[in-house]
Amino acid sequence: MALVRESTPDDASTLGAVHVRAWQVAYRKLMPDSYLDQLSAAERAEMWRDRLKRAPRPKVGRFVAENDGKRLAGFIMVGPAGGEEHSAHGEVYALNVDPDHWGRGIGQALLDAGTRHLGGAGFDEAVLWLHPRNERAQEVLRGSGLAVRGRAAA
């Protein structure tokens, strides 16, 4: 069972590793190997450390999921669409789960926390941008009960 909580600066190192690992596995064959191979967990950790040291912008939520309350297994970040404070819609900025934890309900638990946050912030619709060939993410969203609209690139 996943424990979802707000993220803290102490999570930065693990967030960097999860972020890179999730991208390297999920986007293999969807993005150039050269790009994925050069992603740095240390650089992503520093990005997260900087981001988490600052108070979140209004209506932004940053959550992590711990697998059995022990190991950080994924994260979600949500807020106003386009980062615009007065946007009429919410947005899922990032949702990533360590591939070792795929299929265990972690992504769904994070998505639930993110959508609850967005609803509490006054948004009744939200957008999540996906790679048009990211079938796994599309399947997770369809299974969540959320409406999936849009079109895939040809």
Image (cartoon, helix red, strand yellow):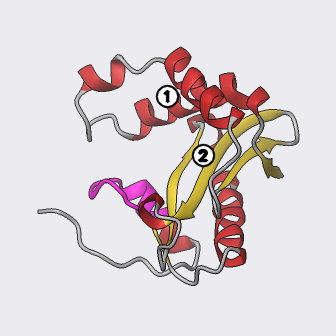
Q: Residues within 10 Å of mark 1 (few under 14, many from 20)?
A: many
Given residues 108 and 55, the one toward you in this image is 55
Measured as percent of width and height from the top left, residue 86 is found at: 51, 73
Disc 2 element: loop
What amino acid type should be assigned to the residue bearing mark 1?
Val
Residue, x 75% and y 30% (percent of image)?
Answer: 9
Where, by quadrant of the figure, is residue 54 drawn?
Answer: top right
Quarter of the image where the C terminus is located = bottom left
Tell me, yes or no, whether the two marked residues, 2 and 1, touch with CB atoms within 8 Å: no
Measured as percent of width and height from the top left, residue 91 is found at: 50, 65
Which residue, given by chain and number where applicable, does mark 2 sit on?
Answer: 102
Q: Is residue 91 magenta?
A: no
Residue 60 relative to residue 38: left or right: right
Residue, x 55% and y 15% (percent of image)?
Answer: 42
Residue, x 64% and y 80% (percent of image)?
Answer: 122
Q: Is residue 102 above or below residue 87?
A: above
**Which residue extends farthest right?**
69
Where, by quadrant of the figure, is residue 119 drawn?
Answer: bottom right
Residue, x 78% and y 37% (percent of image)?
Answer: 8
Residue 101 relative to residue 65: left or right: left
> Mark on residue 20?
1
Front of the two marks 2 and 1? 1
Which one is earlier in the sequence, the residue at label 2 or at label 1? 1
Q: Is residue 134 magenta?
A: yes
Measured as percent of width and height from the top left, residue 68 is found at: 86, 42
Mark 2 and mark 1: Cα distance apart in space:
15 Å
Where, by quadrant of the figure, is residue 110 drawn?
Answer: bottom right
For the record, the magenta segment spans 128-140
